[in-house]
Amino acid sequence: RYVLGIETSCDDTGAAIVDNQGNVLGEALYSQLAKHNETGGIIPTVAKELHIQHVESVVRDTLSAAQMQLQDLDAVAVTVKPGLVMSLRVGLQHAQKLALSVGQQLIPIHHMEAHALTARMIDKIDFPFMVLLASGGHCLLAVARDIDDFLLLGSSQDSAPGEAFDKTARELNLFTLSDFNGLSGGAAIEKLAKEGNPSAFPLVHIMPSRATCHFSFSGLKTSARNLIKKEYQRLGTPTSELLPNAADICAWFQYNLMYHIGRKLQRGFIFAEMKNLLSTNKTLVVSGGVASNAYIRANLIHVASLYGYKVVCPPTKLCTDNGIMIAWNGMEKLLSGRNYFHDANTLDVSARCPLGTDISSDVG
Ligand code: ATP
Ligand code: FE
């Protein structure tokens, strides 16, 4: 059986066809990253235009890579929430056009559920398992109990870790270096941090008094901004140039972010144990763009091992946005035997949609 997935929730136009074994038969991805790096962030109308320009060719390339026609597909799955409404609409409208042309219904997909379940495509992971998603727009910790059944233990109360990486990278002028061409803010910071000292500056205390699984990144973002400003003044570096100690700031920032996530993860492990939320076979899936950071991954794997968890991280390409995860989520829904199809004509998108049942107030 074959499912085509279409993803346009943010700044990547992605499509893929997967089979019921999780083999990827065809895929294509157009990334808007370079454009958004130029403008200093995502401008929704620009993202929408770029999706409009590319969605058709991305889907066409996917079908031809798989040597398939629309008629060969068992279903078309499309991201409908959460995300930028203008971006989501482009993907949905294209999916609607395709589905209507062959008289099919669509499978609507929740972007974060798809991020959470991608790991099941590459590894045999049974429900229930714990999942940490750290990306450009989210940070959340949940227990996945079924393909459409999640318990939300905690989520970011303000900004997202990827966004904090991107902002800090821009304030550090990292993109003025050609070495970082084509990299995201997170990937650029990770690269430079390798040469830096994480304890060159004091630890930032994030939500120290709150015994929850919630996350917060605004305080760290502000601390980084203030530190960078101070260092420009102290060292007399022109503000358009790179600070001589930028590597230390990157290492410090990355360490602080990892430390905060690690602490919240520990709390999640303790809570899951207390409430008996997992089976004896304890698995933690770590995904989302920030999870492609090798330093953060390695440290979280270490923390998880102390609590007896096996950690599964999808490869980088599957951690960031892509069409494969949408196609796979559609496939899981198709294989469940339950009816997840929706009339293509009446399907709509939504900007916000929390993941699963929120039990965060029980934590702590
Ligand atoms: P969401 O899924 O929450 O809607 P998104 O889809 O935009 O957000 P992803 O594509 O999962 O987010 O991830 C993009 C983010 O990941 C960017 O903010 C980027 O800086 C960050 N990122 C990518 N690589 C790394 C890395 N090596 N280290 C840290 N962050 C990274
Ligand atoms: Fe995403």
Image (cartoon, helix red, strand yellow):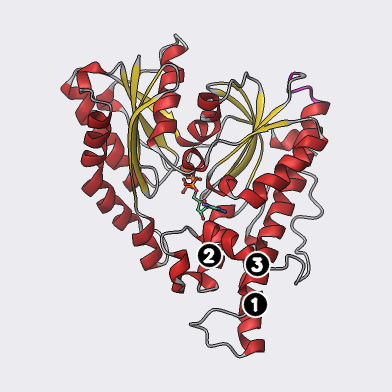
What distance separates the C-alpha of mark 1 from that of mark 3?
10 Å
Q: Earlier in the sequence, mark 1 or mark 3?
A: 3
Are the two marked residues, 2 and 1, in contact with CB atoms closer than 8 angstroms?
no
| Residue position marked by numbered label 1 in the rendering | 245
Foreground: 215 or 3? 3
Is 267 one of the magenta-colored residues?
no
- Callout 3 crowding tier (Cα within 10 Å): few <14, some 14–19, many ≥20: some
Q: Is 299 left, or right, of 292 in this rendering?
A: right
Please provide the residue range marked out in magenta: 274-279
Q: Position of residue 161 (x, y in %)?
A: 59, 53
In the picture of the structure, the residue carrying the numbered disc 2 is 167
The residue sitting at the left extreme is 101
Q: Which mark is residue 42?
A: none
Q: Tell which of 221 and 59 is nearer to you.
A: 59
Residue at position x 61%, y 80% in the image? 244
Q: Amino acid at mark 3?
A: Glu
277 part of magenta stretch: yes
Q: Residues within 10 Å of mark 2 (few under 14, many from 20)?
A: some
Say what secondary structure mark 1 lies in: loop
Element on which disc 3 rests: loop
In the rendered view of the protein, which quadrant contains the C terminus? top right
Q: Residues within 10 Å of mark 1 (few under 14, many from 20)?
A: some
What residue type is disc 2 on?
Lys
Q: Nearer the viewer, residue 52 or 213?
A: 52
Q: Residue 126, located in which quarter of the rendered image?
A: top right
Q: Is residue 34 above or below residue 60?
A: below
Q: Quadrant of residue 325?
A: top left
Residue of label 3: 195
